[in-house]
């Protein structure tokens, strides 16, 4: 995590409202190609490779530290950094590479933070960070895009077009994250395996259909509404939720006792509305309120029409009919590419506990899950008759509600019988 915090220019209160895209990929995958298109479209490019050069220019403390660590054999006759000489030493082993990173990365992080702080409030900042995944920095951006090309093809491109010796290309690839690790970190996957120019259209679409409206939604406090339509279970819901949880954890800090993926998308194999539900457990609704602005900044504005006064399904069923302990706050996602609902509930209150029990009951009991899917299909059919999007969602939710009262009791019976703990 150290690398992440130092190399990316962390989220902080100065970062008013802006959208930050972390762009990464293995060496030679085509990050520069993608970042060029995004900056032509209006993105503010902050390139870690460029900064990494700037902080070791002649006369800088960075260069002096490198010479202390690696000797003056890494200097050319004019006193500037001999990059191939340093690369040969640094990529020869883990220890030397760690030494290099520990000198350069904090300097890159500090300069990055300055540049990001200087961007306009409505900027879409594109941070090109080769080692974003290695440094576990994904949670510090509202979105992470990975440019992908198979490693063997990357070697061919680096050797053929950049005249890099094959052994050097392989040494750097070996020092970087695996494709699987990058896939787990990616909200957006840009496959650059095709011919030059093939990705232009998808990058332009990413800009106009996702980044531009996402940034505006954050500024305006607008959330996206997914239609009440059921889709087949998406095997990536779990990893998508993990990324959202990690981002929420960054801003919630110790205010969150726990953050969980809940709801239907947390039950493998179950058809659902394409909305990832997350629950943040806090100590009080005041704590929830104090998180509201930070959540908006990272892409989850509060939905104001749902207040703490509306009891949830299950209200009173377990004998707990005090409305004061049925409150919650709800935030939605501002990202047009990933509808989500973030429920903030108080530790130990009935709906907070029920959300976890309900999910685990459905995970454990296939018949219960199938019954729920049938209810959802009926609700979706009712919603399909309604024209207005918001009304359709309300129709869908109220059609499901009566079933929940029974489910509340049954889920708790299951929890007791199975010795469930949260
Ligand atoms: C060792 C150096 C001098 C070699 O310079 P060179 O001109 O050959 O490469 P350049 O800086 O253009 O980097 C090209 C690519 O190499 C890869 N790479 C660079 N440094 C590293 C590293 N420490 N670990 C793994 N891969 C790396 C990245 O994919 C990068 O995009 C240089 O790479 C460097 O200073 N590296 C340390 C800084 C760093 O980690 N930069 C990456 C992002 S902060
Ligand atoms: N679709 C493509 N087909 C063939 N060559 C490509 C394609 N896209 C990029 N290239 C070439 O592959 C090389 C690597 O691309 P690029 O410089 O964009 O990668 P990068 O990820 O920024 O690399 P680095 O990690 O070194 O910063 C370049 O020489 C580029 O011209």
Image: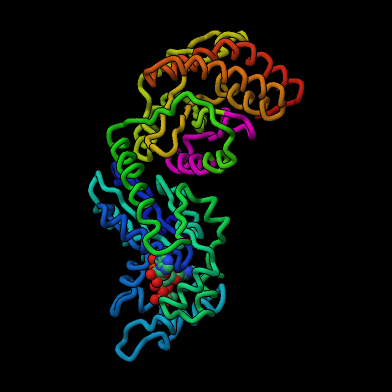
Of residue 33 and residue 131, the one placed in the foreground of this image is 33
Residue appearing at x 68%, y 18% in the figure = 412
Where on the picture, by quarter, is residue 16? top left
* Residues shaded magenta: 242-271
Q: Is residue 66 above or below residue 181?
A: below
Type of colouring: rainbow
Location of residue 66 in the rendering, given as x and y in whole percent from the top left corner:
41, 78
Which residue is rendered at x = 45% and y = 79% of the image? 164
Q: Is residue 107 above or below residue 354?
A: below
The image shows residue 225, relative to residue 44, as above or below, that is: above
Q: Nearer the viewer, residue 117 or 27?
A: 27
Q: Residue furthest right?
A: 417
Residue 14 left/right relative to 128: left
Residue 113 percent across, percent down from the top left: 32, 56
- In the rendered image, which quarter contains the C terminus? top right
Give the quarter the ligand 1 occupies.
bottom left
In x, y percent, where is residue 298? 38, 40
């Amino acid at each position: 995590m150290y690398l992440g915090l130092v190399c990316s220019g962390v989220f902080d209160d100065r970062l008013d409202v802006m959208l930050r895209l972390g762009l990464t990929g293995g060496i030679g995958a085509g990050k520069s190609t993608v970042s060029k298109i995004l900056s032509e479209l209006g993105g503010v490019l902050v390139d870690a490779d460029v900064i990494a050069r700037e902080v070791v220019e002649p006369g800088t403390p960075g260069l002096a530290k490198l010479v202390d660590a690696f000797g003056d054999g890494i200097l050319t006759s004019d006193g500037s950094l001999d990059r191939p000489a340093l690369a040969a030493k640094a990529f020869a082993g883990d220890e030397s590479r760690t030494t290099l990173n520990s000198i350069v990365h904090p300097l890159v992080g500090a300069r990055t933070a300055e540049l990001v702080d200087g961007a306009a409030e409505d900027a879409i900042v594109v941070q090109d960070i080769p080692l974003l995944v290695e440094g576990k920095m994904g949670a510090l951006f509202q979105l992470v895009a990975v440019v992908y090309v198979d490693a063997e093809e990357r070697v061919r491109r680096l050797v053929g077009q950049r005249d890099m010796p094959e052994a050097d290309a392989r040494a750097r690839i070996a020092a970087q994250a695996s494709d699987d690790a990058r896939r787990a970190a990616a909200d957006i996957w840009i496959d650059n395996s095709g011919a030059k120019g093939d990705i232009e259209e998808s990058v332009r679409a990413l800009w106009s259909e996702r980044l531009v409206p996402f940034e505006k939604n954050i500024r305006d406090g607008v959330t996206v509404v997914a239609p009440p339509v059921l889709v087949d279970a998406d095997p990536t819901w779990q990893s998508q939720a993990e990324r959202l949880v990690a981002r929420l954890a960054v801003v919630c800090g110790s205010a969150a006792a726990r953050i969980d993926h809940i709801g239907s998308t947390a039950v493998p194999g179950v058809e659902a509305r394409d909305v990832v539900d997350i629950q943040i457990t806090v100590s009080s609704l005041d704590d929830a309120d104090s998180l509201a602005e930070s959540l908006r900044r990272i892409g989850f504005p509060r939905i104001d029409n749902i207040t703490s006064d509306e009891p949830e399904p299950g209200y009173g069923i377990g004998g707990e009919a005090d409305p004061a302990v049925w409150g919650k706050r709800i935030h939605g996602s501002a990202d047009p590419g990933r509808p989500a609902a973030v429920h903030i509930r108080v530790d130990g209150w009935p709906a907070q506990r029920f959300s976890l029990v309900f999910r685990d009951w459905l995970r454990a009991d296939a018949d219960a899950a199938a019954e729920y899917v049938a209810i959802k299909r009926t609700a979706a059919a009712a919603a399909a008759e309604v024209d207005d999007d918001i009304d359709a969602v309300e129709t869908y939710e109220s059609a499901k509600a009566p079933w929940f009262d029974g489910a509340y009791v049954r889920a708790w019976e299951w929890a007791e019988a199975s010795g469930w703990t949260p």
